[in-house]
Image (cartoon, rainbow, N blue to C red):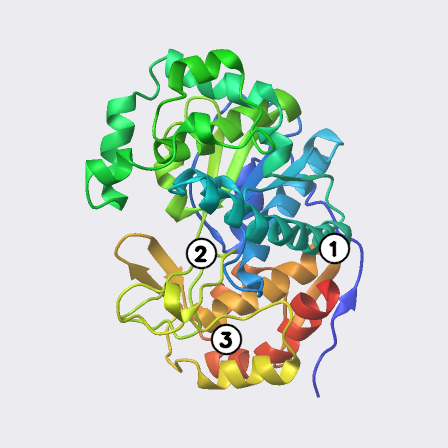
Amino acid sequence: MGCEPIDGGSIPLGRPNMNIRKYIQPSALFLEGVENLTQDSSANVYCGFNVTKTDKEPIDQLQAFIIAKRIQEYNLDQFGKKGTFIAFIGGLFEVLNCRNVEEVDKLIERNKPKEESKKKLFQKIYEKFELEGRILTTEDLWQDQKYWEILKGLFDKQVFTRGLLINDTLNFYQSKEQLMSGLRVKDLPSALVNLPLEFIKKIGNFPAPILYTPAEVSEAYYLKEKYGISIKIGQTQERTYDKYLYQDFSVFRLKQPVSLSSSLTKPEVVTPYIDKSEFELSGAKKKEVRLYFEESLAEISQKVSLSENEKYVYTVEDIFGEVINPIVEKAILAIESAKAMGIKSVCIANQRFNSGQDLIDSLLDGSSQLQDVRAFLPKILNQFVIKPFS
């Protein structure tokens, strides 16, 4: 006889002198962090997202909202206020990599509706998780001249130099000539970017692609100034941008999610908020096996049944570090999503789990079995991840 989930309000931990790390570690999704120790009031947090490449939204992006919920519980418990969570959807940042104005127009036409579609999904998550905050898209930042003034200031302070950015960007181009022959900053459409005159004078002739890293870093400083953001959360793949923020922000990085076909010796990391078509996958890499918010219980069950059936909890990917068995990782999403909606525990094979770490510990000490998690996974994903946001 199985146990049914118990509904109940989200209960603050109520422990004195707790820090944010101790609130997010029980999720089992936290990997590493750089912490600013000046936090003496409720913390405002942000996470950046991109649009998906297909018409499907992966469930893995729920990670960030789970951590944001835990931080807001910390805020409420310690300071009596939830604070703010900003989800920023930068789906039009890719215009910086376009070769000409025609490509820019096509990208805007393709990605702007995707920003709005993702925003609607995120609004449902905010509502179900009772998150305080705002969801912003590219134009919310790029139409504000203050954003570009902040970016220009980073150049003025020599945080970035044209030469170093060109060298970094050349990693993605066949030659310097190819990079220099592309779109210029001054060619970006005014309907999308509200560039101050001083900005155009200073870097208007720069190749637009070299602005990608400064644009990512500027979003953090803009949100800090406008919304009092002091914490950035994101994935391991964002280390390139995060290193510029350590002096002024706490940065919490989450374990990189994996494809369902990931294995012990060949982990397949994925970008949580982007689904790629087979054409877009590099080399001979097979199609990533992902789970999506739009899927039925039957579709989830089929994918889970075809996934790698290996007995391990953790493995290590060469670049991204420690990652989790995909079956366990997706079960953690269900348990933590339920918790964020005020459900005290999730039942798997007659055992109740209050957090992602509860599940990890139970598997590691042998009191739970991976085959049971695998058997229950479609049901709990459908109940706590798919249905609430469909």
In percent of the image, x 52 and y 21: which residue is there?
148
Q: Judge depth for marks 2 and 3 and give the one in front.
A: 2
Describe the element under mark 1 as helix, strand or loop: helix
The residue that disc 3 covers is 367
Q: Residue furthest right?
A: 8
Q: Can you see residue 50?
A: no
Describe the element under mark 2 as helix, strand or loop: loop
Measure how far apart labels 2 and 1 are at the Cα level. Answer: 21 Å
Q: Is residue 388 above or below residue 302?
A: above
Q: Position of residue 72 (x, y in %)?
A: 67, 40
In percent of the image, x 68 and y 45: which residue is there?
13
Q: Nearer the viewer, residue 314 or 178?
A: 178
As shown in the figure, which amino acid type bears the numbered disc 1? Lys
Q: Badge 1 local density, few (<14 within 10 Å), some, or many (20+)?
A: some
Residue 342 is marked as none
Residue 124 is marked as 1
Q: Position of residue 376 (x, y in %)?
A: 59, 80
Describe the element under mark 3 as helix, strand or loop: loop
Residue 271 is marked as 2
Measure how far apart labels 2 and 3 are at the Cα level. Answer: 32 Å
Marks 1 and 3, the one that precedes in the sequence: 1
Q: Quarter of the image holding residue 154?
A: top left
Marks 2 and 1, the one that precedes in the sequence: 1
Q: Nearer the viewer, residue 19 or 310?
A: 310
As shown in the figure, which amino acid type bears the numbered disc 2? Thr
Q: Badge 2 local density, few (<14 within 10 Å), some, or many (20+)?
A: many
Q: Badge 3 local density, few (<14 within 10 Å), some, or many (20+)?
A: few
Q: Can you see residue 381?
A: yes
Q: Residue furthest bottom?
A: 1
